[in-house]
Amino acid sequence: MRSDLPRILRNGGRVRVLILDPTDESLISTADRQRTHSQGVENLRQRVLTTLQDLTTIRVLSSIPTAGFNCLDMSKTNGLVCVQHYEFHPDGEAAPIRSAGRGPSGG
């Protein structure tokens, strides 16, 4: 996914990424504790900072989101939204995952 960002932007696409504020110590620490496999606060902060360097428009969060949204081709009639509710240390992949399309079939 990360390697696709430059190509999408070069082709006129728009990518929006919402990330945690890397300067908020308590936020980064809390986020690291909520990860199933903690890699350490500084590692998480560095991953966020690296992502910031890759983006052209930057917005950061001051809270940890409870859901993730992937929106694909939203300007088209067959656009897709996939929503994933995050769980605290799930046994497998976090659930529920729901998707909805904008086309005639409703997704």
Image (spheres, helix red, strand yellow):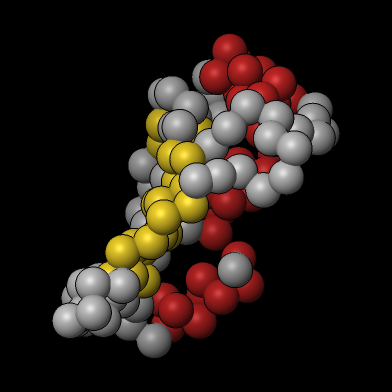
Q: Quadrant of residue 102?
A: bottom left
Residue at image coords 60%, 65%: 2
- Residue 71 in percent (x, y) is at 35, 63
Quadrant of the snapshot with the N terminus: bottom right
Rendered view: 1 above or below 32: below
Q: Is residue 54 left or right of residue 33?
A: left
Report the number of discs.
0
Closest to the observer: 87 or 18? 87
User: Does residue 83 sit above or below 20 in this rendering?
Assistant: below
- Rendered position, 34 above or below 78: above
Which residue is pictured at 79% across the width and 30% down the height? 38
Instruction: Report the residue at 70% width, 30% height from top.
Output: 89
In this rendering, does residue 89 appear at all?
A: yes
Q: Is residue 60 above or below residue 101?
A: above
| Rendering coords of residue 51 (x, y %) | 58, 51
Q: Quadrant of the C terminus?
A: bottom left
Question: 72 left or right of 97?
Answer: left
Residue at figure coordinates x 48%, y 52% from the top left = 97
- Which of these two is toward me, 81 or 92? 92
Pinpoint residue 81: horizontal percent, then vertical percent.
34, 62
**View extreme (front): residue:** 105
Farthest residue, direction top: 26
Residue 14 visible: no
